[in-house]
Image: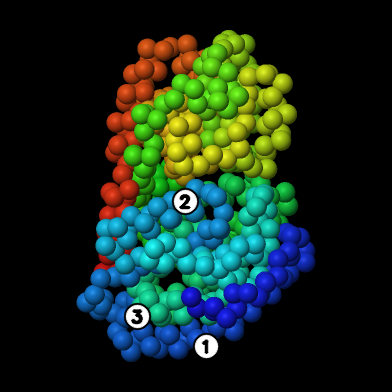
Amino acid sequence: MPGDTLLSRPRPHRPMGPLGVAGFLFYFFRELLANLPAMLRMRRARARAGKRAGTGRPPARKPRVVCVSDNLDEVNGIALASRIQLRELRRLGYDAWLYGVAFHTQQPRREGADGALTLSAGVYSVDQAGYANSELAIPRLGDFIEFLEANDIDLIEFETPGPVSHLCLAVALVTGIPTASHYRTDIITYSETLIRFRFGVAFVQFWTRLFTRNAGPVIVPSEAYRDKVAAMGVAPARIHKLPRGVDLAAFNPSRRDENFWTARGVPADGFLLLYVGRVSAEKNLEALCDAFPRALERNPDLRLVTVGDGPWLEEMKARLLPTGRAHFTGVLHGDVLATAFASSDLFVFPSLTDTFGNSVIEALASGLPCLVSDEGGPQEIVVPGVCGEIFAGNDPDSLKKGIVALSQDPARLARYREAARRRASEFTYEAAARAFWDLYLSILKN
């Protein structure tokens, strides 16, 4: 990969703080200025080849697209979804790549049989505020420019508004490569929940709005986020809602195992509620901590299993373990996670800030009815009265009532189980990949 001679050189990494931020800004602008001549040379070369944006002369060959993202070395929904989207695009015969920066604890590398995922070397990184085991990295822009030239890229889609995407967007703007961005994390809301300093909140929100306004057409995963993106100054005509997919083979009701939870220390003596996701304040888990003990007063047979990890885990344990009916498994993956979904009775997802809700669609694909809030993307996936119910997100009492009502109505739950799988079958990887590719072609044409 580009920059192979530098892969063994360790890069500076600091905790988030004054020194960390100072180093971050220094390396950010150093990379930008040091690589400006190379960007201008690439712009002139693209102009000579008639490939500058706006010429109306797309190449005769198939388009070549790269998706750029921060934190691909982390276990998170964006990293997983980006890999799945890449795999599906390549399976369909499209020329697509995925590009990011390896964490400072990992080796830069290529992944996949065809090497379509590049995790390149960075020059500097800091811990990401509010997220354990995550970091903000500065990429080697020279490596990215070499990647663009080597693969003759026509369009760049940005998955995140972090520093990797910001610097790569600067390359695209200078060189004239068309771009699009994907608003798949509600950073505006997250910043208010996770960052303690007003200046930090203001900076992150300014950074996100600036990026979103300048990164071309914006993809949103749900109608709920059209207005939020428009409020950043993006024209409505530039906002496109595109579907996501779910692995219907991996997440399947046939995986239900009556002994699954007992083998993991969860007694099979009641109605099992499941939460899967990041254990963090922005997921509105405080509402679940308020609602669950009160629901137990109405139905003592309830049990709650939390699958995941995050900075709010210890607080959640302190609130719920005294009930004697709450359990925590840590992060689960693959077939084990799929069996966890299928072997539960009700999926509870209190988040107010998810733009889509991957775990919600995975639950439905597993035949698991869902109880979700009335804010964010999940409410657009769950059809109330058909495959689940919706509660008032800012009202823990509404969540409590939903839990109690569903747990005491086995006939309704049985109907919802059957309908859940049918609803999930409307979301396929292939349909999502084709919709994205159609948008790429439209951007290049226009």
Residue 33 placed where, x, y %?
Answer: 59, 82
The picture places residue 413, in percent across and down from the top left corner, at 40, 18
Residue 52, labelled with which disc?
Answer: 3
Dot 3 or dot 2: first in sequence order is 3
Q: Earlier in the sequence, mark 1 or mark 2?
A: 1
Q: Nearer the viewer, residue 114 or 360?
A: 114
Q: Quadrant of residue 199?
A: bottom right
Q: Distance of mark 1 from mark 3, alpha carbons?
A: 17 Å
- How crowded pointer 2 is (Cα within 10 Å; few <14, some 14-19, many 20+) is rated as some
Question: Which residue position holds label 1?
Answer: 37
Nearest the viewer among 161 and 231 is 161
Residue 52, quarter of the rendered image: bottom left
Looking at numbered disc 2 in the image, what kind of residue is underneath it? Leu
- Residue drawn at (65%, 75%) of the image: 9
Residue 119 x/y as whole percent: 52, 66
Residue type beneath disc 3 = Arg
